[in-house]
Image (cartoon, rainbow, N blue to C red):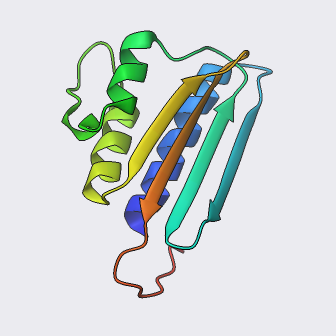
Amino acid sequence: GTSVRQIGLNLLLNASHAAGYGGTIVFRSDTDGDNLRISVRNSGRKIPENLLQCLNDKSNGKLTLDDRAGLGLWVICRLVEELRGQIQAVNAEEGAIVRVKIPFGDGAVRHAA
């Protein structure tokens, strides 16, 4: 639960920063049977191409913390990889969308709160 909460929080913080003052953010989460799906969309800045490649690369957990990627992005990539999940990031007509898919583990029900 803690890792999933951290992923959601960092996605929201990044989207808020990108949306800027007066921008909008849409956060959605649901399940598709065996996976938790989280989607965050912002109406502000697009994701730079080099970061899109890092996010969409299957080895996204290997992202290095440098001038191109903030701590939040690095944390998201590491946690999603540890949870055997996937990240898909795309630029929309306005802003960007980041989707995370995390498989349920051992079938045990856990609460994040």
Q: Position of residue 29 (x, y in %)?
A: 64, 57
Q: Quadrant of the N terminus?
A: bottom left
Residue at the spot x=19%, y=35% of the render? 62
Q: Position of residue 46 (x, y in %)?
A: 58, 15
Q: Residue at x 48, y 37 (%)?
A: 88
Corner quadrant of residue 18: top right
Counting from the top left corner in percent of width and height, residue 100 is at 49, 48
Residue lying farthest bottom? 108
Instruction: Work out which residue is located at the far right of the displayed protein and give it.
Output: 22
Q: Which image quadrant is residue 83 in?
A: bottom left
Where's residue 95, x and y in %?
A: 67, 19
Q: How many marks?
A: 0
Q: Relative to 60, is 37 on the left or the right? A: right
Point out the image quarter for the C terminus: bottom right
Question: In the drawing, does residue 46 fall left or right of residue 52?
Answer: right
Query: Relative to 37, is 1 above or below?
Result: below
Q: Nearer the viewer, residue 23 or 52?
A: 52
Q: Is residue 41 above or below residue 50?
A: below
**Could you tell me which residue is drawn at 73 percent across and 40 percent down?**
26
Q: Left or right: where does residue 74 sit relative to residue 18? A: left
